[in-house]
Image (cartoon, helix red, strand yellow):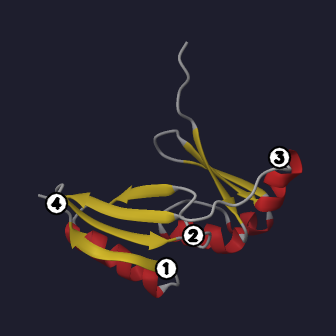
Amino acid sequence: MAPRFDLVGIVVADMSASLAFYRRLGFDIPADADGEPHVEATLPNGARVAWDLRSVITSFDTAWTPSTGGPGITLAFICDSPADVDETYASLVASGAGAHHEPWDAFWGQRYATVVDPDGNHIEVVTHAP
């Protein structure tokens, strides 16, 4: 049997800050998870996302170091409309996310914006053009 995609892992420096950011993107994560070293959330489609403190990763991989020179990962979140992209971008930036690329109409047919999560990862907020 072929492998099947199951989980995206995000290594974080501050669990509480990271989970607060992802809650604003719609993740259903209990408030008491903020103090945990490892947290998982299952998405409606069955895929999972996990957050691990750096100390968890280095406990079994002593050679691990944070990525440098750019984001460790890029995740994309689809919105229902161009206005939703603009609103989501503005809301995330107002709540402290890093502003990387303001919403724009990309030549490939999407309304597209990028913010930066608390660990420097790029989070794309997009919708397909009507």
Q: Give the left or right position of residue 71, taking residue 130 as reference.
A: right
| Badge 2 amino acid | Gly
At horizontal 49% and vertical 79% (from top left) the residue drawn is 98
Residue that carries the numbered disc 3 in the rendered image: 61
- N-terminal label among 3 and 2: 3
Q: Are marks 4 and 3 in contact (CB under 8 Å)?
A: no
Q: Are marks 2 and 1 in contact (CB under 8 Å)?
A: yes
Q: From mark 3 to mark 2, how far is it between C-alphas? A: 21 Å
Secondary structure at badge 1 equals strand
Q: From mark 4 to mark 3, how far is it between C-alphas? A: 41 Å
Q: Give the left or right position of residue 36, taking residue 81 as reference.
A: right
At horizontal 72% and vertical 71% (from top left) the residue drawn is 14
Residue 4: which disc? none
Q: Are marks 1 and 4 in contact (CB under 8 Å)?
A: no
Residue that carries the numbered disc 1 in the rendered image: 98
Q: From mark 3 to mark 1, how far is it between C-alphas? A: 29 Å
**On-image quarter of the N terminus:** top right
Crowding near the residue tagged with mark 4, few <14, some 14–19, many ≥20 C-alpha atoms within 10 Å? few
| Badge 4 amino acid | Phe
Residue 120: which disc? 2
- N-terminal label among 3 and 1: 3
Tag in front: 3 or 1: 3
Secondary structure at badge 2 equals loop
At horizontal 25% and vertical 59% (from top left) the residue drawn is 127
The residue sitting at the left extreme is 130
